[in-house]
Image (tube, grey):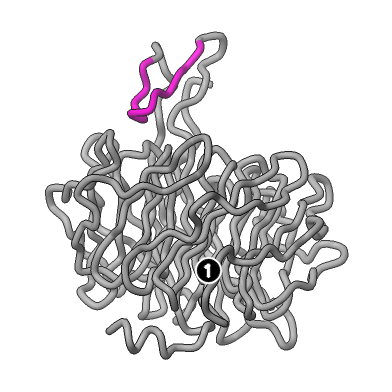
């Protein structure tokens, strides 16, 4: 699809990937386990990592699951299960459950994840209605997997997740009203939810999350406008937060930029990062972050940036942009060493190795076969030896 056609699309029909990236190594009883910037585990003995899986929604009404080889990053042959035909959201609640939104039918598809094979089984009662006059889009979950949020038209739908069955139940006070925001992200601490503000003059809605009830409360000053915006509508879609939880980034599809804010860790208030917004490729519609790097998918290329840990300023990685015939989802594995890009048109998932400087090298065997992949997320099973 050309940039001109993409720009002509209305907000509900641009597919945005949410990314899920998890820590690479934990503690084994009293043995300290440290993960350096490389993402590899240097402690010993470390817990033995269990299986890791990549999940993808598709343009053919399926949800795919593929095992990830820990050493090489290669993807196994995908298994599939029925899912939404047009989804704007895909997110996992912990390592047990996976959810995909369906804005056409105002429903959420829910699945339990087999810890050994990654095979998905529909949760009893799935798909679940999100209510009348609802258009569930992007999904976000808290780190504990206790709460699920669906970005909706002028609101956020909040659900508590049953830890045993995975059934989502609307929380007290839901929905929580905002403006039009199709994508959202929860901070690594689980304290805050940030949602794109598609209505001009554009920006970010910010909420605090009640740890007990999952209820949302507006952060003072929300929504926070896009800094230095020179047009009436920059059309923000994808949103991401860096692993430290210090910075929020938003892709501006009409101005080919990435807006950036620093996050007050106590209040959730956003402050523009110096120099924001930053120029990027044509029509950025996907974002993901790992370590001190930010990646955005544009029309046929991945742009890579180093995040300054103090200021949040973005600096292009050497060699960026990295050409790839993909225009859909973007996600990074739990080790932070492999990046995957969905290419629905060519029925494949492209994979790259992430170097220490953030640059990308195509992975052997890439692209891996997958029918019509669109949105991607990754789940790592709990470690053994805890």
Q: Is residue 216 visible?
A: no
Q: Quadrant of residue 37?
A: top left
Between 44 and 207, which is closer to the camera in this rendering?
207
Q: Is residue 106 magenta?
A: no
Q: Residue furthest right?
A: 173
The image position of residue 30, as x and y in percent, is 56, 9
Q: Residue at x 43, y 59 (%)?
A: 278
Between 116 and 222, which is closer to the camera in this rendering?
222
Q: What residue did someone put label 1 on?
A: 89
Q: Secondary structure at mark 1?
A: loop
Instruction: Say whether residue 114 is left or right of residue 154.
Output: left
The image position of residue 248, as x and y in percent, is 56, 52
The image position of residue 230, as x and y in percent, is 52, 75
Q: What residue range appears in magenta?
A: 32-42
Q: Is residue 207 visible?
A: yes
* Residue 337, placed above or below residue 274: above
Instruction: Say whether residue 20 is left or right of residue 354.
Output: right
Q: Residue at x 32, y 55 (%)?
A: 66
* Residue 101, placed above or below residue 132: above
State the count of labels.
Answer: 1
Instruction: Say whether residue 212 is left or right of residue 305.
Output: right
Quarter of the figure that contains the N terminus: bottom left
Q: Residue at x 33, y 28 (%)?
A: 38
The image position of residue 361, as x and y in percent, is 17, 47
Between 27 and 336, which is closer to the camera in this rendering?
336
Main secondary-structure element of the magenta-colored stretch: loop
Is the residue marked by circle 1 packed among few (<14), some (14-19), or many (20+) residues within 10 Å?
A: many
Q: Residue furthest top?
A: 30
Q: Residue at x 23, y 66 (%)?
A: 348
Instruction: Say whether residue 112 is left or right of residue 15.
Output: right
């Amino acid at each position: 699809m050309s940039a001109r056609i993409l720009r002509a699309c209305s907000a509900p029909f641009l597919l945005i990937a949410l990314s899920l990236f998890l820590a690479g190594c934990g503690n084994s009883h009293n043995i300290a386990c440290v993960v350096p910037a490389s993402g590899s585990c240097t402690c010993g003995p470390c817990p033995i990592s269990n299986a890791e899986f990549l999940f993808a929604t598709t343009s053919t009404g399926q949800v795919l699951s593929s095992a990830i080889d820990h050493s090489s990053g290669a993807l196994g042959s995908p298994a599939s299960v029925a899912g939404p035909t047009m989804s704007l959201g895909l997110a996992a609640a912990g390592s047990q459950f996976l959810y995909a939104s369906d804005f056409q039918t105002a429903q959420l598809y829910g699945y339990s994840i087999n810890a050994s094979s990654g095979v998905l089984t529909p949760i009893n009662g799935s798909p679940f209605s999100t209510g009348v006059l609802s258009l569930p889009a992007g999904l976000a979950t808290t780190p504990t997997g206790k709460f699920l949020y669906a970005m909706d038209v002028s609101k956020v739908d909040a659900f508590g997740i049953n830890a045993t069955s995975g059934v989502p139940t609307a929380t007290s006070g839901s929905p929580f009203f905002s403006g039009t925001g199709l994508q959202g992200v929860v901070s690594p601490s689980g304290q805050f939810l940030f949602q794109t503000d598609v209505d001009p003059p554009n920006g970010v809605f910010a909420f605090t999350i009640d740890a007990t009830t999952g209820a949302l409360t507006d952060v003072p000053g929300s929504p926070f406008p896009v800094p230095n915006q020179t047009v009436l509508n920059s059309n923000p879609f994808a949103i991401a937060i860096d692993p430290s939880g210090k910075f929020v980034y938003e892709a501006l599809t009409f101005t080919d930029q990435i807006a950036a804010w620093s996050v007050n860790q106590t209040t959730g208030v956003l402050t523009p990062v110096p120099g924001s917004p930053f120029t990027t490729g044509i029509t950025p519609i996907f974002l993901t972050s790992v370590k001190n790097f930010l990646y955005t998918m544009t029309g046929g290329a991945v742009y890579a940036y180093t995040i300054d840990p103090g200021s949040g300023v973005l600096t292009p990685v050497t060699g960026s942009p990295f050409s790839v015939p993909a225009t859909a989802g973007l996600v990074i594995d739990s080790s932070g060493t492999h990046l995957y890009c969905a290419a629905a048109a060519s029925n494949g998932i492209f994979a790259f190795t992430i170097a220490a400087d953030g640059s990308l090298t195509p992975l052997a065997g890439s692209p891996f076969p997958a029918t019509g992949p669109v949105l991607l997320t990754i789940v790592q099973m709990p470690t053994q030896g805890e």
